[in-house]
Amino acid sequence: MDIGILQAGFDVKASIEIDPFCCETLRHAVEREKRKTKVIEQDIRTVDPLELKERLNLEQLDLLFGGPPCQAFSQIGKRQCLEDERGMLLFEMVRFAKALSPKAILIEQVKGLLNAPTENGEAGGVFKRLLFQLEKLDYVPKWKVILVADYGIPQMRQRVFIVATKKPNGFEFPAPTHTDQQNITGLFPLPPYRTVGEVINDLSTPSRLNGVIPEDSHADVTPANDSFRINGVPEGSHLAKELHLPIEQRRTLGKKDTTKFRRLSRNEPSLTLRCGEIFYHPIENRYLTPREYMRIHGYPDNYLLKGPIRARSGQVKYLDQHRQVANSVPPPLAFYLAQSIRKTIECQNSLKSSAIL
């Protein structure tokens, strides 16, 4: 998210992150861009926001932003909500807001947050509690479920974004920049959704991952057996659907396995990039590389990931490069949101100045 925030003209003072590989990625970006952002590798629950404010010599914070872990609210997980300690991390945003009193707050979460139940089973209770606690701090929260394809990102990813500002709240979510081909009408239509082919077709053949991770993360980690199993699956389809393929290729896959052994289409946006299965290249019998994931997510080519690229048969304790991308907010969307937030803050500052005069 910080890529887009920086592009919108904010100076990111600190990033709090517990995953060591993500911190390595963040530190590399800070060093390369010659920024003074402090990367704090720590459990956010152990960070004292007032001590941090003093450490950063902050007089006034314009924007507090974050994407707390989504696993507790995701509909594809166990969905333990507030019974999962990761679910409670959502309210760390409130704790920091109470201490730092930022002019604006930006929170990203999965759609499942909207109907996530509280401890007593109240549907949507977690979301209501979050809004209530923000309102108690004199913020006016606005929220919207955003499809990232509407903002030029070739992916059908939907997430809920909450923006809270102090009264008077003049914030408006940014207008879409792209639209579905079927909705293109009128004299000045928006351009159609961008596609997977548009953003990855010019990439060279990836290198094989043989113990050395290339700096650009354009590495192929496909085992021979997985290359065999995806062979014959057409663009935009998945292995379980191709009943004409031999049983030794399909094995035990069933009707619900729509994201396993899934091949993307060059002519459409990608499905939501996920942390579990990695999608396959549209025409080659291999998984997409982390660099291809970054292109689909809207990362600039000069941004480099650090940490391991997980072999599909292996395990990594912390976030490997594919999952770092899938867990993140697409940078262009963060930019559009931050740009609108900045305009709101500038307008509020102008109103206050007028009142003083």
Image: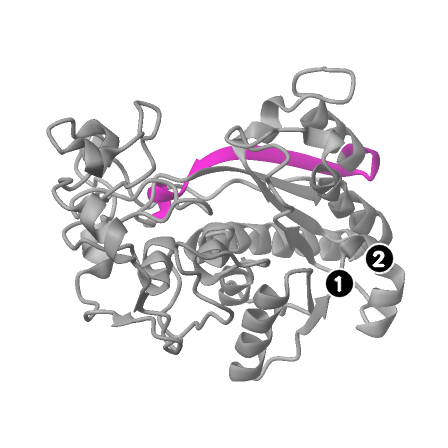
- Quadrant position of residue 297: bottom left
Start-end of magenta stretch? 135-151
- Quadrant position of residue 206: bottom left
Location of mark 1 (residue): 42
User: Hey, what amino acid is under mark 2?
Assistant: Thr
Percent coordinates x, y for residue 27 in the rendering = 60, 75
Location of mark 2 (residue): 46
Total labels: the figure holds 2
User: Hey, what amino acid is under mark 1?
Assistant: Gln
Q: Nearer the viewer, residue 189 or 320?
A: 320
- Quadrant the N terminus occupies: bottom right
* Residue drawn at (28%, 54%) of the image: 287
State how far apart marks 2 and 1 are (Cα).
7 Å
* Residue drawn at (50%, 41%) of the image: 173
Q: Secondary structure at mark 1?
A: loop
* Residue drawn at (54%, 54%) of the image: 338
Seen in the picture, residue 299 relative to 193 is either above or below; the reply is below
Tell me whether circle 2 and circle 1 mark residues in contact (CB < 8 Å): yes
